[in-house]
Image (spheres, rainbow, N blue to C red):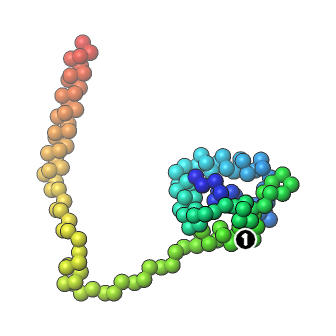
Amino acid sequence: MNFQVTVLKILVSYPDGFAVMEDLKRDMAILATSGREWADRTKRLASRVPDLDIFSQGLVERSSGGWQITSKGRATLEFMEARPSAPKPMPALSVEQAIATSPAPVPPLRQPADRAKRRRERRERRREARERARANAS
């Protein structure tokens, strides 16, 4: 989880962008334990501004027991959250060109007979394991 991005996201969610330290700590704890998605999201956002430093860059100000996001901080967060521009459309290819530039052919799917055989083998292994466990238990 990227601490600085998380601070910006928390502060922008408060009225006037100001939160006292207790609220910041509580929200940080919630987000830190919310799962892998939040950590991945903050890493992705932080990658858009690699030299991010919320205090030295004036994105967040410390004031009277809390922190407040500045207009520059809001603009930076909007930049980080902006979706990249749409990729340029590729020119249309003829069928021959598409075949010539396509990657290696995809191997054929396994046939149902193969699946049934694997299923039988798996059942057989399980049955043998149960029999061994019974023999060892007695």
Count all numbered tags in the image, as a single digit. 1
Q: From this view, report whether residue 76 is shown above or below residue 85.
A: above
Quarter of image, res 12: bottom right
Q: From this view, report whether residue 16 is shown above or below residue 126.
A: below
Quick check: can you spot residue 53?
Answer: yes
Does residue 69 appear left or right of residue 118 in this picture? right
Q: Residue at x 23, y 78 (%)?
A: 101
Quarter of image, res 15: bottom right
Q: Residue at x 80, y 57 (%)?
A: 62
Does residue 109 appear left or right of residue 20 in this picture? left
Q: Could you tell me which secondary element the residue under label 1 belongs to?
A: helix
Of the pair 111 and 108, the residue shown nearer to us: 108
* Horizontal and vertical percent position of residue 4: 65, 57
Of the pair 104 and 56, the residue shown nearer to us: 56
* Horizontal and vertical percent position of residue 84: 52, 75
- Residue underneath mark 1: 72
Quarter holding the C terminus is top left
Q: From this view, report whether residue 39 is shown above or below residue 123.
A: below
Q: Residue at x 86, y 54 (%)?
A: 64
* Horizontal and vertical percent position of residue 66: 80, 54
Q: Residue at x 70, y 69 (%)?
A: 74
Q: What amino acid is at disc 1? A: Lys
